[in-house]
Amino acid sequence: MTTIENFIKGIPKAELHLHIEGAFEPALMFEIAKRNNLQINYKSVEEIKKAYDFSNLQDFLDIYYEGAGVLIEEQDFYDVTWAYLEKMHSQNVLHVEIFFDPQTHTDRGIEFKTVVQGINAALRDSQNNFGMSTRLIMCFLRHLDEEAALKTLEQALDYKEIILAVGLDSSERGNPPSKFQRVFKKAAEEGFLTVAHAGEEGPSEYVWEALNLLNVSRVDHGNNSLDDEKLIQELLIRKMPLTVCPLSNLKLKVVDDLTNHPLGKMLKLGLLATINSDDPAYFGGYLNENYLELSKALNLSKEEITQLAKNSFIASFLDEEEKRQMIDKVEAFYLENH
Ligand code: HPA
Ligand code: ZN
């Protein structure tokens, strides 16, 4: 009998909610800071890890933006991305869709192309070395104004071959999706798909806005959707994917305990929920650790875990034929290991 742990390790899966700046491990942060002759405010990896004790989203974001500040050269962006992709390959992840936050870097004087080219070179290498498929999603920082987002979109127009979609992240409360209606409309006209973080700390109204004003193909997080019966029905009708992040929710105190995590209810309602890591270097676990910790807390069955792995491909931006092939692999794994 395959243990739950080995079942999770082995099952083919995709990750759809991952901020590349959030995959920046402290050890690599020290190494890159050193070669760029930059100081960081901590003496050791242990000291950094101790600082990763957050009481809410903003608390985390302050440290996350600070960490990203040592990324200067194209090689730096390559190294962070490559380290993440190698880790994903070791966890039997066959497909990843990665967020990046260009404004975090361009506002420090780093060129847009340095960021995109560094990340993209690693994405290409993972295709060539691991056969892993990848997509890139550019997020606008919602604590900044829409003008800044429009300028960022302008810079992305030369990279349509590389950037598939736009998203919305950073401080949610007080920064509703409606603030970015014009830039999302322009992005869609330019051919980008759209996603948005909504309902992580913000209310269910923000999820409605993401659906109706930003026309999103997926909702990132979406936890607070469960407060609104009508919204649940709407998400079901639209087969709208939710990219849920259990360890992130725990570390940012969106849930008080994983045993109270809403993903169990989402699955029972038939919502298209997926498991993701969000910012694994900060939240204490990559994709498999998120599956495992949540499975233990909610006592998920192999059938439910299989459904989550299938959902990760159904909710992805792969084409229908690619999805079919991936889902066949998930089903074959289940039949051999349940
Ligand atoms: N929420 C909002 N913005 C973010 C997050 C998140 O969980 N992670 C990185 N940026
Ligand atoms: Zn996120």
Image: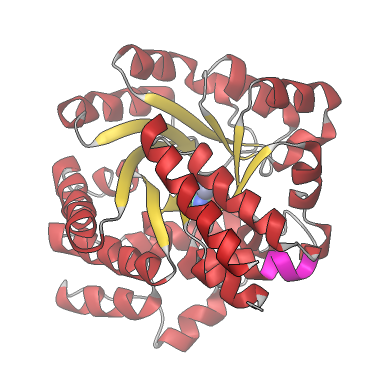
Residue at position x 53%, y 46% in the image = 312
The spot of residue 65 in percent (x, y) is 41, 56
State yes or no: residue 49 in magenta. no
> In the image, is residue 39 above or below residue 282?
below
> In the image, is residue 222 above or below residue 256?
above
Q: Of residues 98 and 102, which is closer to you in this image?
A: 98
Is residue 249 visible to us here? Answer: no
Is the magenta region chiefly helix, strand or loop? helix
The spot of residue 8 in percent (x, y) is 58, 68
> In the image, is residue 89 above or below residue 306?
below
Tell me where the magenta segment starts and ends, as one range.
293-297
> In the image, is residue 334 above or below residue 216?
below
Is residue 90 visible to us here? Answer: yes
| Image side of residue 77 versus residue 66, left or right | left
Residue at position x 51%, y 56% in the image = 332
- Quarter that holds the N terminus: bottom right
